[in-house]
Image (cartoon, helix red, strand yellow):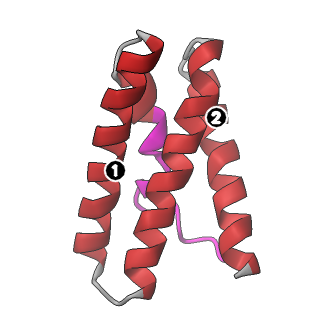
């Protein structure tokens, strides 16, 4: 459980810092970080339930898409400001490092 919480915290930080590198406006960084962390949480929960990596990636990508569209309407910003940084945890090899 502690490992999952640490992964979510580091995923949030990684998503926000990647958003900074992409020059996402400040008002969109926090919600973009939450989108990345929530999508990674659903990904990890699917993996823990032995649903397979393809299904887990599909669920994570769907969560990113749905939440990004809602955040874009709420913040009146382009969707790409939310979905590109949120995809960082799903980059191949990103889970290669085990703590």
The residue labelled by disc 2 is 16
- Which residue is painted at 34% across and 90% down in the image? 50
Front-most of 88 and 29? 29
Mark 2 element type: helix
The answer to whether residue 24 shows anywhere in this view is: yes
The answer to whether residue 93 shows anywhere in this view is: no
The x, y position of residue 72, in whole percent, is 38, 20
Question: In terms of image quadrants, where is residue 49?
Answer: bottom left
Q: Tell me where the magenta segment starts and ends, as one range.
A: 85-99
The residue labelled by disc 1 is 63
Q: Mark 2 or mark 1: which is in front?
A: 1
Classify 25 as above or below 49. Answer: above
Category of crowding for the residue at label 1, using alpha-carbon neighbours closer than 10 angstroms: few (below 14), some (14–19), many (at least 20): many
Classify 70 as above or below 86. Answer: above
Front-most of 53 and 97? 53
Q: CA distance from mark 2 to mark 1?
A: 17 Å
Question: In terms of image quadrants, where is residue 74?
Answer: top left
Mark 1 element type: helix
């Amino acid at each position: 459980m502690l490992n999952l919480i640490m992964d979510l915290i580091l995923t949030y930080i990684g998503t926000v810092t990647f958003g900074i590198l992409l020059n996402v406006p400040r008002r969109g960084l926090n919600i973009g970080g939450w989108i990345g962390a929530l999508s990674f949480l659903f990904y990890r929960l699917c993996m823990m339930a032995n649903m397979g990596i393809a299904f887990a990636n599909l669920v994570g990508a769907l969560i990113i898409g749905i939440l990004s569209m809602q955040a874009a309407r709420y913040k009146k910003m382009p969707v790409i400001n939310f979905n590109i940084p949120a995809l960082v945890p799903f980059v191949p090899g990103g889970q290669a490092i085990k703590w």
